[in-house]
Image (cartoon, rainbow, N blue to C red):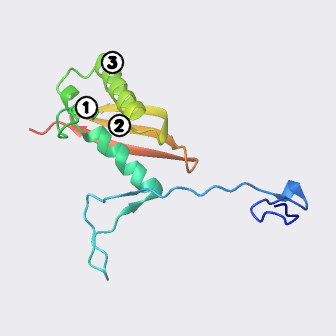
Amino acid sequence: MTSSTTILSDKSISGDLKKARITSRVKGWRDLDLSLTLHPVRKDIIPLKDDNAIKNAVKNLLISNFYERPFSRDIGANLRALLFEPADAITKIALKDNIRRVIQKYEPRVTLRGIEIKYVDDSNAYNITVMFKIKEFNTNESVEIVLRRLR
């Protein structure tokens, strides 16, 4: 049985090929906002979306310590363990190494661009700024955290 009909699934591109564009659908990311802000109408928790969700995930990785997450004992930067070390260059290097390790291992959606660590003598705290690029959205973002000793 032979047929001269064209199969409908075969499509050919005609017209100006320079104007043809390949578009991809950007995957949406969602995360729970830990501030638990309620929506004014629905009275439901407002989720974080896209780049804010990724920034929240990076921040959660930075403030997590080892053994805090059940069945995942090595997830986290363990920065609080270094808080009571002497405030010198070696401690700053250890902080940077822990931050770099946790982001490269557990956050494949971002590319690390830089880490700034400043020690504040008056309050015995570290101001840490982590700069990264979100791969999917091609945007540069940063997360700031303050590590402070509580007395």
The residue sitting at the right extreme is 15
Under mark 3, the amino acid is Ala
Looking at the picture, how far across and down is residue 17, in whole percent? 87, 55
Between 118 and 78, the one lying in front of the other is: 78
Q: Dot 3: what SS?
A: helix
Near mark 1 (Cα within 10 A), the count class, few <14, some 14-19 or many ≥20, is some
| Among the two numbered marks 3 and 1 on one chain, the one whose residue lies closer to the N terminus | 1
Under mark 1, the amino acid is Leu
Look at mark 1 in the image and give the residue it sits on.
Answer: 79
Q: Quadrant of residue 100?
A: top left
Q: Dot 1: what SS?
A: loop
| Among the two numbered marks 1 and 2 on one chain, the one whose residue lies closer to the N terminus | 1
> How far, Cα to Cα, is label 1 from label 2?
10 Å
Disc 1 to disc 2: CB gap under 8 Å:
yes
Looking at the picture, how far across and down is residue 41, in whole percent? 32, 83
Q: In the rendering, which numbered label is found on residue 32? A: none
Look at discs 3 and 1 and give the one toward the viewer.
Answer: 1
Between 109 and 14, the one lying in front of the other is: 14
> How far, Cα to Cα, is label 3 from label 2?
14 Å
Look at discs 1 and 2 and give the one toward the viewer.
Answer: 1
The residue lying at 25 percent from left, 23 percent from top is 87
Look at mark 3 in the image and give the residue it sits on.
Answer: 89
